[in-house]
Amino acid sequence: MAGVLFFRNISKHDGLRQHKQTDALLVHSAIIQAEPLWLFGGEKNLMRPFCLKFLAVLFGLMGTVTGALAEPPPAYEGRRLFVSYCQLCHGKMGKGDGPLAKQMGISPADLNTTVRSRSDTILKKIITGEGPQTITGRDRHNILSDAMPEWVNVFKEPQVEALIAYLRFLSTSKHPLMGDPEVGYKLYNTYCAVCHGEEGEGDGVMTKMIKISPADHSNANEMNPLSNDDLIYSILHGKSQFMPAWDDILRPAEVEALVSYIRLLSN
Ligand code: HEC
Ligand code: HEC
């Protein structure tokens, strides 16, 4: 019964009144009217795995009609840039062991430890090469070595800030990125944003239709105490009544990708 009510509410919801969405909603209602009790008659969880497949299609459809993907967080963009421009020397985890560093016989700093004590202003100077290059804690009279390229003409200000956000993530996060966040970003928008919100704040469109308050994935205080394994477990098996179990729909690599994206959201 709750299911029928729930979907009636969808058609009343202002945010979904727009023209293009009507067709998709008609399709949804047709599916739902045919199988209302299957969807919501489960004794344990609102969404049984095979019904979840219906919902997955439904949410995917919603994602398509609502248009462009949400803006990803700065640390996400910073990671993309880091992979393309910095990893070569600094290594995947920023430890200074990238393939080009070996080739050049240089040893870049371990960003995991050095970045922590540096202000954003100093990091910006180090990355762009603009301004005085005196940085404490290094040999060679505290002058940054020429082996660190100057990126002033390569990046615009928001990109430098994104890089700094990712360096902060690298140097503070206790939870390593275990999958590909770029895959996670797309999956999150397709399957999770409907409840968790486009920016992970727990304010997705569904929260206005049913009484749920999903975890706030952008809140570091809430997310940091949870290990990667905790997150994987919740995603695979669901949590309490309304967090669905995705083990039937998502492959292990996709779940890991989602966990990585959630980590960058809460940075
Ligand atoms: C060609 C190799 C190379 C590339 C590519 C490179 N770096 Fe560096 N980087 C270095 C070296 C070598 C140092 C150490 C310089 C020193 O100790 O004087 C360094 C130092 C740094 C430092 C200072 C670390 C500290 O002491 O706090 C930061 C921050 C940094 N790099 C960020 C970046 C970022 C961000 C990128 C990508 C946009 C990048 N680097 C790309 C070689 C590189
Ligand atoms: C139907 C709404 C809904 C959808 C869709 C949904 N979630 Fe959730 N999720 C919830 C709710 C509600 C909670 C909070 C459950 C609780 O704390 O009891 C939750 C909790 C979680 C948690 C656990 C965090 C914690 O506090 O332990 C994770 C991780 C999570 N969701 C990830 C996802 C991912 C990834 C997706 C997409 C693949 C997703 N969720 C899709 C409703 C949803």
Image (cartoon, rainbow, N blue to C red):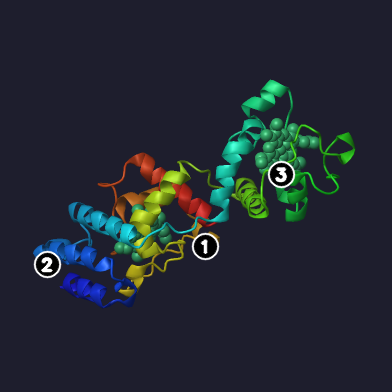
Residue 8 appears in the rendering: yes
Q: Which residue position is annotated with label 3?
A: 153
Q: Is residue 238 above or below residue 182?
A: below
Which residue is pictured at 21% across the width and 61% down the height?
A: 44
Work out how far the residue at label 1 is from the one at label 2, CA to CA, in angstroms.
37 Å
Which residue is pictured at 36% across the width and 58% down the height?
A: 192
Q: Residues within 10 Å of mark 1 (few under 14, many from 20)?
A: some
Tell us which disc is closer to us: 3 or 2: 3
Amino acid found under the numbered disc labelled 2? Gln
Q: Is residue 115 left or right of residue 87?
A: right
Res. 219 mark: 1
- In this rendered view, identify the residue nearer to me: 77 or 5: 77
Q: Is residue 102 above or below residue 40?
A: above
Q: Residues within 10 Å of mark 2 (few under 14, many from 20)?
A: some
Tell me where residue 57 appears, x and y as whole percent.
24, 54
Work out how far the residue at label 3 is from the one at label 1, CA to CA, in angstroms.
34 Å
Which residue is pictured at 33% across the width and 55% down the height?
A: 191
- Which quadrant of the figure shows ligand 1? top right
**Which numbered disc, 3 or 1, marks the residue that appears first in the sequence?**
3
Q: Which residue position is annotated with label 2?
A: 33
Amino acid found under the numbered disc labelled 1? Asn
Contact, mark 3 vs mark 1 (Cβ under 8 Å):
no
Mark 3 falls on what kind of element? loop
Give the total of numbered labels: 3
Quarter assignment of residue 43 = bottom left
Q: Is residue 56 above or below residue 2?
A: above
Res. 79 mark: none
Q: Is residue 33 above or below residue 235?
A: below
Tell us which disc is closer to us: 1 or 2: 2
Quarter assignment of residue 120 = bottom right
